[in-house]
């Protein structure tokens, strides 16, 4: 999963000229496959969940099953400054993990956008409270395959 940088000019969709981080990867045939992406710029996870990036950060392979994906930008809103260290993590999810993260992003997008705000509806993960079963903990536990790509923002 190599990391590449794509230069894009300012448009109605892009806030400014500059390089944006992108990855190439091959989705395995058959499926279904589910993914979560995280993009770190100089060690900071960019961006938090919002309605604008919900479908970029959590995905299922319905439209690209078994095909190569070229130049995918997990976050096309972030312009990469020259010399900035960028790391993109692609996390393979189970169906239950995908459903959990999708609901989390969807609820957060409808709320305040603050990752620590209370969701408008209960989102149940797969973690149980063994001492007080009537109280549902917030969270999801899972093991996943993680692929990492990183690079340094190019000079303009």
Image (cartoon, rainbow, N blue to C red):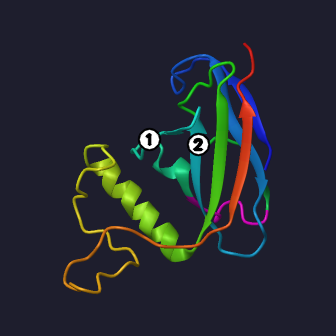
Image quadrant in which you'd find residue 71: top right
Circle 2 sits on which residue? 39
In the rendered image, the vertical position of residue 52 relative to residue 25, given as above or below: above
**C-alpha separation, residue under disc 2 versus residue under disc 1:** 15 Å
Image quadrant in which you'd find residue 107: bottom left
Tally the marks: 2
Please say if the residues under marks 2 and 1 sit with CB atoms less than 8 Å apart: no
**Magenta residue span:** 59-66
Q: Position of residue 53 (x, y in %)?
A: 48, 44
Which corner quadrant holds the C terminus? top right
Outermost residue on the top side: it is: 156
Q: Secondary structure at mark 2?
A: strand
Q: Residue at x 44, y 41 (%)?
A: 52
Q: Is residue 76 left or right of residue 2?
A: left
Q: Residue at x 73, y 45 (%)?
A: 149
Q: Which mark is residue 84?
A: none
């Amino acid at each position: 999963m190599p990391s590449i940088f794509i230069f894009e000019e300012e448009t109605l969709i892009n806030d400014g000229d500059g390089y944006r981080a992108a990855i190439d990867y091959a989705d395995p045939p058959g499926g279904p496959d589910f993914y979560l992406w995280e993009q770190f710029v100089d060690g900071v996870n960019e961006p938090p969940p919002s309605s604008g990036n919900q479908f970029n950060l959590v995905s299922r392979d319905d439209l690209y099953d078994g095909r190569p994906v070229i130049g995918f930008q997990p976050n096309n809103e972030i312009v990469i400054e020259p010399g900035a260290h960028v790391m993109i993590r692609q996390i393979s999810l189970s169906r239950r993990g995908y459903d959990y993260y999708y609901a989390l992003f969807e609820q957060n997008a409808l709320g305040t956008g603050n990752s620590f705000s209370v969701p408008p509806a209960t989102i149940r993960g797969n973690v149980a409270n063994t001492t007080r079963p009537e109280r549902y903990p917030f969270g999801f536990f899972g093991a996943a395959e993680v692929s990492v790509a990183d690079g340094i923002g190019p000079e303009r």
